[in-house]
Amino acid sequence: MRTLWQHCHAATMVGGRYSIIEDAAIVTSAGLIEWIGPRTELQPVEADREVDMGGAWVTPGLIDCHTHAVFGGNRSGEFEQRLQGVSYAEIAAQGGGIASTVRATRAASEDELFASARQRVQALMRDGVTTIEVKSGYGLDLANERKMLRVARRLADELPLTVRATCLAAHALPPEYGGRADDYISHICDEMLPALADEGLVHAVDAFCEHLAFSPAQVERVFIKARELGLPVKLHAEQLSSQGGASLAARYQALSADHLEFMTEDDARAMAAAGTVAVLLPGAFYFLRETQLPPLDTLRRHGVKVALASDLNPGTSPVLSLRLMLNMGCTLFRMTPEEALAGVTVHAAAALGLSASHGVLEAGKLADFVAWQIDRPADLAYWLGGELPKRVVRKGHEISN
Ligand code: DI6
Ligand code: FE
């Protein structure tokens, strides 16, 4: 069906700028944008349907390029404990932290994980998200990592959403491998990744490079296997310390390096040369009350593309609004509203390897867009939370969340 959408302004995000079309018209058909431009330049078109957008501002559908949306259990109790002065170390010693989410995820059925993840993902969708990345990483054995990745695929099957599934088996050391990190990395490389890749459950491979997780040498073993399997990589890097993970990721042409509070200028230089996207995660920075800011000016100076994401996870970033991340990217990290919007559209698409089909409003791209009843594009980063009135269009069809 061909639809003509008009009486709107478009922030197309082409080239990572607003690239605004005032008084725009958009023609969609077969799930794609057929034409977009000034309404005065629109050639006669036989549309099955015409939609008056009421002066709305249209942006590409928002892309949340870093989430751990699938998990069992709940860790708000740890939140309370920390506010009563209990330290991370004491919580971990009590069996809390990632380990408690691993236990809850292993104990949950696929249906239970799907039901809880769907609720969280639908909250993001109500905020204009039309594409999401979902990581495994709370199963930490083949059966449970498979269970998580199957839930990610089911989210794509049952919701009007593009879902990219990332295997993060190298997220934490499972209890059965206590003290044997190298053996666990061997298990990931020799058994888990080949099986999950063969089952078509994995779009990319991620790892957590940190002194309390895995070393650059252990991460590199995972990257080598991912490359053998033809899978792109991404990395949780420099979140709590400088490990050289971001430069390692760049050496493997990673789609992205994520967190980056402690990254160096050498990391930025390497990422720029490799085209690796910097994914900043203000939710985790804020929730952990981190004080080390990611070096935004260094990233700008080296021309590294910067994306923003929720890092939705139960321990460090229980975030259910990507638009709030726009505000935090500006308020905490000093991004401009234009940079922040690029961070959840065109640059987020690049962080997922989806630049050919997602992230900007131009002919040939997926017809995923949001028509916001706002006065200016900066309003998206300006308003803290809440739900801005909007119409969400997915593959050319309006959806109600
Ligand atoms: N960095 C984080 O902040 C989360 N994972 C990671 O690699 C923590 C996940 C959790 O606490 O459940
Ligand atoms: Fe994360």
Image (cartoon, rainbow, N blue to C red):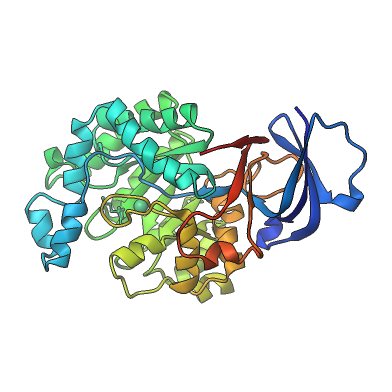
To which quarter of the image does residue 9 belong?
bottom right
How many marks the image carries: the answer is 0
Does residue 74 sit above or below 80 in this rendering? Answer: above
Q: Position of residue 219 (x, y in %)?
A: 33, 49
In depth, the one of 77 and 185 nearer the eye is 77
**Outermost residue toward the top in this view:** 199
Residue 201 left/right relative to 275: left
Residue 362 left/right relative to 156: right
The answer to whether residue 332 shows anywhere in this view is yes
Q: Position of residue 24 (x, y in %)?
A: 80, 52
The answer to whether residue 272 shows anywhere in this view is no
To which quarter of the image does residue 100 belong?
top left
Residue 39 left/right relative to 82: right
Query: Quadrant where the N terminus lies?
Result: top right
In depth, the one of 278 and 151 nearer the eye is 151
In depth, the one of 80 and 343 nearer the eye is 80
Q: Position of residue 266 (x, y in %)?
A: 46, 70
Does residue 327 sit above or below 397 in this rendering? Answer: below
Q: Residue at x 18, y 41 (%)?
A: 174
Residue 259 left/right relative to 8: left
Q: Residue at x 46, y 73 (%)?
A: 331
